[in-house]
């Protein structure tokens, strides 16, 4: 990675698992915290002068009956994710499944005043946060084989290793995923990303593939 700017990634979990934040300066992990409230994660990002934050959670809820365009476009690439419902449907659910999406919503809200949401309008200038997806990141950057959810514990560490990131201090798959989100932020800073989605449903940003794919 050429960029030495400081970037961050956040893996979003439910209330029990919590959120995980990893901050990278170049390839060095300079901060790794778990189960902290959004305000504390924001404080850490400001302290380390983070430029971009990748977040593994929907940046916007679905509007109406149609699914989010970003998720549809990823599905056409055979990259599948949980379908984001409308906020009303998520609130009405009794299963508790969507609590992680509400946690993600709270993170975006906490970061909004300092890290505006990526909108795909022109080049990225100043701080930004954006939605990304570890499986899609792995699919783009894995050199040896097709990305597999069953092999994510080894494959995702392999992607970090190939990027020059020492992942030994990352104790869980959630911390690994947070580091992958930060890696995606590096690619965004270098302008080497593919974006899926639209303004209505929000964008999912992942690194451009190693085969030379260009920014969309």
Image (spheres, grey):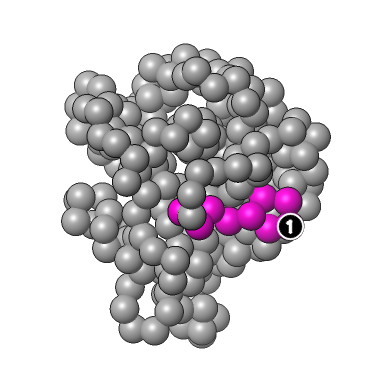
* In magenta segment, residue 101: no
The residue positioned 68% from the left and 35% from the top of the image is 50
Q: Say if 92 sits above or below 128 in the image.
A: below
User: Is 41 displayed left or right of 54 in the figure?
Assistant: right
Q: Give the side of residue 137 with respect to residue 54, left or right.
A: left
Q: Is residue 210 above or below residue 112?
A: above
- Residue 40, image x and y in percent? 78, 47
- Spot occupied by residue 51 in the image (x, y as percentages of width and height): 65, 37
> Who is closer to the viewer here, 161 or 93?
161
Query: Start and end of the magenta stretch?
Result: 112-120
Residue located 60% across and 42% down the image: 125
Above or below, 168 against 105 in this view is: above
Residue drawn 68% across and 62% down? 109
* Crowd around label 1: few <14 · some 14–19 · many ≥20 (10 Å): few
Residue 48 in view (yes/no): yes
**Left or right of 196, for residue 5:** right
- Relative to 140, residue 40 above or below: below
Q: Which residue is mark 1?
A: 113
Q: Position of residue 160 (x, y in %)?
A: 44, 23
In terms of image quadrants, where is residue 171?
A: top right
Task: Farthest residue to the front: give it.
Answer: 122
- Does 52 sit left or right of 216 as displayed? right
Q: Position of residue 158 (x, y in %)?
A: 37, 21
Q: Quadrant of residue 112?
A: bottom right
């Amino acid at each position: 990675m050429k960029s030495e700017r400081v970037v961050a990634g956040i893996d979003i979990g439910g209330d029990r698992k919590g959120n995980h934040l990893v901050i990278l300066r170049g390839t060095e992990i300079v901060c790794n915290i778990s189960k902290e409230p959004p305000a504390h994660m924001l404080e850490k990002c400001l302290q380390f002068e983070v430029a971009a934050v990748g977040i593994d959670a929907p940046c916007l809820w679905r509007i109406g009956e149609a699914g989010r365009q970003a998720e549809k476009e990823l599905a056409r690439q055979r990259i599948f994710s949980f379908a984001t419902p409308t906020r009303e449907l998520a609130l009405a659910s009794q299963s508790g499944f969507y609590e992680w999406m509400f946690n993600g919503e709270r993170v975006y809200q906490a970061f909004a005043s300092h890290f505006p949401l990526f909108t795909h309008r022109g080049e990225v200038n100043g701080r930004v946060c954006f939605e990304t997806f570890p499986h899609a990141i792995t699919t783009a950057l894995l050199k040896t084989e097709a990305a597999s959810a069953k092999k994510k514990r080894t494959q995702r560490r392999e992607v970090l290793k190939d990027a020059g990131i020492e992942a030994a201090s990352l104790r869980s798959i959630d911390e690994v995923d947070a580091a992958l989100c930060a890696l995606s932020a590096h690619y965004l800073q270098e302008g080497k990303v593919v974006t899926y989605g639209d303004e209505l449903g929000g964008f999912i940003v992942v690194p451009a593939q190693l085969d030379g794919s260009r920014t969309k």
